[in-house]
Image (spheres, grey):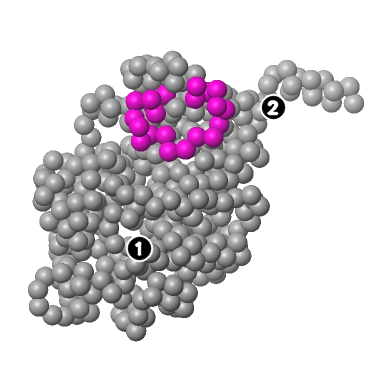
Amino acid sequence: MRALKILIIAILISGCTTSMTQPTASLNTVAERYVRLVLAMGEHDADYVDAYYGPPEWREIVKTERAPLQQVYDDALALRRDIAAIAVPSDKLLTLRHEYIRRQTEAVITRAEMLRGRKFTFDEESQALYDAVSPAHPESHFQSLLQKLEGELPGDGALTDRIEAFRKGFVIPKDRLDAVFQRAIEGCKERTLQHIELPSNESFTVEYVTNKSWSGYNWYQGNNRSLIQVNTDLPIYIDRAIDLACHEGYPGHHVYNVLLEKHLFRDRGWVEYSVYPLFSPQSLIAEGSANYGIEIAFPGAERPAWEKQHLFPIAGLDASQADRYYRVQDLIAKTSYAGNEAARRYLNGEWTADRAVEWLVRYGLYSPDRARQRVKFMDQYRSYVINYNLGKDLVREYVQRHAGNDPKKRWEVFEELLSTPRLPSALKK
């Protein structure tokens, strides 16, 4: 008995029990430094801090001090060194946390380097910021996709013009937009709540805005609240109601942020999840899961059937051509990587903005106005564009690999992904 007591005391003194406690304490320390660092970066980059609901005094201190960019950069380098010195915890979730803070900090360093003038290629930038590189596709890939669309919409004139003429019959009238969108939100929420439990006080407000480079945006406020803004600069087609309601709301950005706040920030006290730096690996998970959330909520033929029953009547649209419309939309969706190719060549300096617009119109099947809006998005957010389509593909592959064809299991894997520290590179495992 005495020998056992001596052994216990020796373990406590030697620190052998710190495999769980000491890394946790150290991670808490670097996590706080990381949050303050992200806030400090936000003083030099207006788009950087997408959400913050941590201690208000931290933000006030950062605003008052307004550290020079060089100091922010130096502090980020020091933080990376200190994170690397922390022993990797044996606990799986803590290991994910350790890797998350390390990789997010590296993205802070990259963004600081960009603001200091360093030039990255498109692929270098996306790898450094988002932990992923979009595959390259030759022009012939998109030409083959256009041939399939030619068969669906035969006729004279440019294919883009034919598509635009056909789609005009599916524009939501502006005076009915909110009613359609609210019904879409209800449908997305109903399906999400069948599988994911959310706090009783969660909610969001919808605003309609103009003069933006994006079509929709979720501004997470903390305490289970979001502000969702919908850009009405350009016509909004009937299918975009579900797209936006799922992507920005249920089970997309709003649900993602609510789950992170509850499970990681509130329940575990992991303060790094009180801040969301837009230009970071977290964004690929956020955008990818939001886009995949559309098809997990409305799989296969369920979506057009639901829209025809619930949204077309509210919008006052004729559903007689709806099946053809969705076939066209499915084919158009396959051209999404044309946008990545345009961004890669434009941001690498190989193309002018006009050349990028021309490519988007021809192979991305954008209207000229939408193509110009997309190039403005590239100007503002650069390689962020990969997070939507590549992110969706990576999330889909991850969920299907772990859940197979079981719809219930897919929701379980999806919720687990939204509630734990994850990095894009880890989605391939």
Q: Does label 1 or label 2 sit earlier along the sequence?
A: 2
Can you say whether 390 is above or below 236 in the image? above
Q: Pinpoint residue 168: horizontal percent, then vertical percent.
A: 25, 71
**What amino acid is labelled 1 in the image?**
Lys
Q: Which label number is shown at residue 427? A: none
| Residue on which the image places disc 2 | 17
Q: Measured from the top left, where is residue 320 in percent x and y?
A: 34, 84
Q: Residue at x 59, y 41 (%)?
A: 223
Q: Is residue 86 visible?
A: no
Q: Nearer the viewer, residue 24 or 373?
A: 373
3 horizontally vs 318: left or right: right
C-alpha separation, residue under disc 1 versus residue under disc 2: 63 Å
Residue displayed at 66% across by 40% down: 267
Which stretch is magenta?
40-60
The quadrant where residue 164 appears: bottom left
Comparing 5 with 307, the one in front is 307
**Quadrant of the image containing the N terminus:** top right
Q: Outermost residue toward the front?
A: 175
Q: Are marks 1 and 2 in contact (CB under 8 Å)?
A: no
Secondary structure beneath dot 2 equals: loop
Which residue is labeled 1 in the image?
174
Instruction: Answer few, some or many: residues within 10 Å of disc 1's Cα (few below 14, many 20 plus, some between 14 and 19).
Output: few
Q: Nearer the viewer, mark 1 or mark 2?
A: 1
Residue at position x 13%, y 40% from top?
A: 349
Q: What's the residue type where badge 2 is placed? A: Thr
Query: Can residue 169 be found in the magenta stretch?
Result: no
Q: As rendered, which of 404 and 62 lies closer to the eye?
A: 62
